[in-house]
Amino acid sequence: MASRPGFLTDWPWAPLGSFKYLLLAPLVIDSIYSYATMRDYEKLLVVAMTVWRIVHSQVWISLSRYQTAKGTKRILNKSIEFDQVDRERSWDDQIIFNSLIVYLTKVYVLGTDTLPFWRTDGLILVALLHAGPVEFIYYWFHRALHHHFLYSRYHSHHHSSIVTEPITSVVHPFAEHIGYTLILGLPLVTTLLCGTASVVSIFLYITYIDFMNNMGHCNFELIPGFLFSLLPPLKFLCYTPSFHSLHHTQFRTNYSLFMPMYDYMYGTTDECSDSLYETSLEKEEEKPDAIHLTHLTSVDSIYHLRLGFASLSSHPLSSRFYLFLMKPFTLILSFILTSFSSRTFVFERNRFRDLTLHTHLLPKFPSHYMSPEQKECINKMIESAILEAEKKGVKVMSLGLMNQGEELNGYGEMYVRKHPKLKIRIVDGSSLAAEVVLHSIPVRTREVLFRGQVTKVARAIVFSLCQNAIKVMVLRKEEHSMLAEFLDDSCKENLVLTTNYNPMIWLVGDGVSTKEQKMAKEGTMFLPFSQFPPDKLRKDCVYHTTPAMIIPHSAQNIDSCENWLGRRVMSAWRVGGIVHSLEGWEEHECGLDNSILNSPRVWEAALRNGFQPLRTSSIFRDPRDSTIRTN
């Protein structure tokens, strides 16, 4: 929002939220009807253009976030936070606005007349009108927007984003977009009046505007230097991402739309334009200090990743009505991603003080981990990721979700035994996860009910509880016998096989059934010790999050949520790797035989480094931003 919002700041359909796309429903229905009855395809082309513009922008979003995560040719090494993501959620408003204008022009101006597919004179006229009047008028309009009166009421909203993303280019108040539409529409209106407009000229010009807008705000340099050496005049006809990035950091330079010639003519070119361009091109892929390796969860999680839909990734993973409509495309995309990707890749970059942390994705779903045929493939991908990180000098790799399963690789121990000279430290994060659960149990608790798959975390929790004379009630014989193997004779008496569902604290892991949840007493607190949360079936019970901690304010570039966790909350397994790296510990923390007695040390180190626990009695969810907060 601008510092002093002016008239027509908000979009007319802002109250509709995601339902704003219903505004296009009459357009879609009428276009289908027109084609079916009159073979009028031009209205359908308006719909196709709308879809193409959304897809085009999303490709730029994903590409930009991937490149800036890698660090290659990155321009600004600063962070993006949740407030920017929230502010830029309206990036598609201008697509809806333009689609309605084009549609109304077709209906009320062209009527039943049709445009030719191609006209060379029309294309030339559009190019000349853009290079001349459009660029000139935009330059002075843009300079006017930087006058304090207009800047404080309108343009400051756009400049709130110092570090730009492709969609930053179209995040403006409604009044500004009216001005931009009038300016950028000059070539199209002129060719319509002159009778030289064509389908191709309209399509190419709108695509050109979107392409240049997205490129100028992508925050990585992609135009090779040899182009300017071969064609020196190109410097005045085509800006670079670094050229426009300076406008967002210096504010009073580089005003041009896409062609810098007017900045050179009127002396507003930033003196650092050439040097920033050259240094940005020279930046190589960044070497992280630590890597967290995760994988896909639900089918829709491909959109929830930071490389996916920005608005979705900034909120906890949940279902959306429009994702249901996209299900066929989602399944195709998921198949391509999981079948043809043979290695992990970076999709997120964070900073913790002097520590650079990358998050890598192993493109597999939980169903793949359950398949015996896939285990060898998954292990090879994890091993390759470890060895590649070793070559780059990465200090720590933490294994998230099912990448450190007992049956898969023995909590990472398989890789350490296979490569005993590894310098990179493998962390499964179980110690901290166990401590997080233990510190979530209310004080004065004398008994808890255990139900779920017996894991390393489960054993550590039960071991600690039994040592502290807290009764652990177990419902199933096989779980009781597996847990008893890890207990001393002195505390085995505190592990009790029972059919009693009365304890008010339930420790639940993978495998807890709906029937068992229904047996719990009203007010029961479910504490998950698994990385996957149980289904929330009981409104009269309390469900804690999976083991997680609130990250410190010093953590930077945090603009997405980790699966189903709230904003600025990370899973304990991921935090365990970060703490391991921050503390500079030299040992591995993986394998079933890894001592669980080190858990208090990891917990104390996490608190010392600013991570905060999520207190059971004080958790609530802010409905506006899905942030997990504590009182």
Image (cartoon, rainbow, N blue to C red):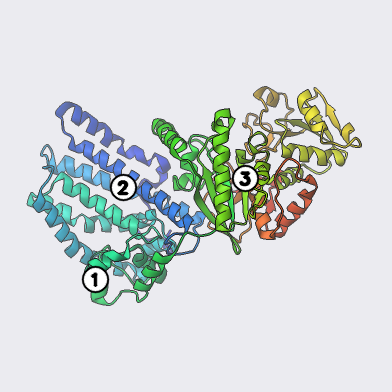
Q: Secondary structure at mark 3?
A: strand
Q: CA distance from mark 2 to mark 1?
A: 28 Å
Amino acid type at circle 1 is Tyr
10 Å neighbourhood of mark 2: few (<14), some, or many (≥20)? some
Residue at x 40%, y 30% (from the top left corner): 328
Alpha carbon of mark 2 to alpha carbon of mark 3: how far? Answer: 41 Å
Question: Residue 485 is drawn in which quadrant?
Answer: top right
Is residue 605 depicted above or below 467 in this figure? below
Q: Which mark is residue 95?
A: 2
Image mark count: 3
Please report whichever mark, 2 or 3, sits nearer to the chain's N-terminal start. 2
The residue located at (80%, 24%) in the rendering is 500
Classify mark 1: helix, strand or loop: helix
Secondary structure of the residue carrying numbered label 2: helix
Q: Which residue is mark 3?
A: 399
The mark lying in front, picked from 2 and 3, is 3
Residue 538 % position (x, y): 65, 29
Residue 589 drawn above or below residue 184: above
Q: Quadrant of the N terminus?
A: bottom left
Q: Which residue is mark 1?
A: 262
Disc 2 and disc 3 in contact, CB within 8 angstroms? no
- Picture coordinates of residue 246, whole percent (x, y): 38, 69
Percent of width and height locating residue 547: 67, 43
Spatial CA span between label 3 and label 1: 52 Å
Dot 3 amino acid type: Leu
Residue in the picture at 9% in, 53% down:
121
**Mark toward the start of the polypeptide (3 vs 1):** 1
Q: Tell me, yes or no, if residue 498 can be seen here.
A: yes
Q: Is residue 546 left or right of residue 182?
A: right
Mark closest to the chain's N terminus, 2 or 1: 2
- In this view, the residue in front, 140 or 535, is 535
Name the one closer to the observer, 520 or 79.
79
